[in-house]
Each structure stands twice: as C-alpha cells, then as structure tokens.
Amino acid sequence: MSKLTIKNTRPGGFGIPGGPVIEAGASLEVDQADWETVEDHPVVRAWVDAGHLTVEGVRTAKAAPDSSDKPKTALEVLAMANDPTVQFMTFKSAATKLLGDKTPTKKDEMIAALEELATQP
C-alpha cells in the first residue's frame, strides 16, 4: 500500500478519530490502509468534503487476500502495541478487526480488551 499525506487547511487543529492531532496548516503522512480505517468517519468525511482536510498521494488498489493476509491473533496484535515501529493507527486497525464494534478508543483500554480476548479459551 502507498503513503498518503493528510493536510489540515484550517486555522485550528484536527484530531483524527483514535489517532493524532494534525495542527493548523500541518500535514501528516499515513499508510493508505490506516487512512482507509477512518476516512468514512462522519466528521472526517465532512472535513474532507468541506476542503478542511486534503488527501494527497496515489492510492494503490487493495490487493486480493492471500495466505499471508490471514487475520492476526490477539497475541500478535498485542505485540504490535509495544513495537515502536508500528504506528498507532496500524495497531488500532488490527485491534478493530478482532474486537469489532466493542473496540475502545484509548490504547490502554484496547490492550486490556486484547489481553482478555487472548486469555479466552
């Protein structure tokens, strides 16, 4: 997947749901997959539609799933939480795939939910 640049064109900051704040006039580079997890959020969609957030970069087509795209286990996602090379949105996306609609908004709460999931038989 490719990298996209999200720019906040407003005079105030904008907090990406479950992610970082993009300061006024600043940009944030994100993985396309991470952006796809939040781009349909009603507030994000409204800001993009109003031109307050711009998305730049070339999107790649989603690859067809293969055997390497098998879902991660709760333990694998927990390991992502402590890996400094893994962005928060990547961790959140993987956690959401396991926890679904019950995914907490805070990282420590996600970790607790994943730990509970990992210990269930």
Image: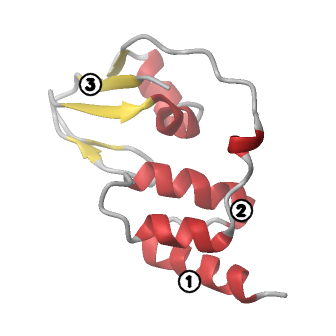
Q: Mark 2 points at which residue?
A: 98
Residue placed furthest toward the front: 67
Helix, strand or loop status at disc 1: helix
Point 66% across, 71% down: residue: 74
Q: Position of residue 120 (x, y in %)?
A: 79, 87
- Name the residue type under label 3: Lys
Q: Position of residue 89 (x, y in %)?
A: 45, 50
How many residues crowd mark 2 within 10 Å: few (<14), some (14–19), many (20+)? some
Helix, strand or loop status at disc 2: helix
Disc with the residue nearer the chain's start (3 vs 2): 3
Asked if the residues shown at circle 3 and circle 2 are in contact, with their CB atoms under 8 angstroms apart, the answer is: no
| Distance in Å between CA atoms under marks 3 and 2 | 30 Å
How many residues crowd mark 1 within 10 Å: few (<14), some (14–19), many (20+)? few
- Name the residue type under label 2: Leu
In-front residue for pair 70/28: 70
Residue placed furthest toward the right: 121
Point 39% across, 44% down: residue: 16
Q: Which mark is residue 49?
A: none
| Distance in Å between CA atoms under marks 1 and 2 | 13 Å
> Which is closer to the viewer, label 3 or label 1?
1
Q: Mark 1 points at which residue?
A: 112
Helix, strand or loop status at disc 3: strand
Which quadrant does the C terminus fall into?
bottom right
| Residue 118 image-quadrant placement | bottom right
Q: Position of residue 33 (x, y in %)?
A: 53, 34
Left or right of 86, for residue 93: right
Q: Name the residue under label 3.
A: 7
The vertical placement of 78 against 119, above or below, is above
Figure coloring: secondary structure
Disc with the residue nearer the chain's start (1 vs 2): 2
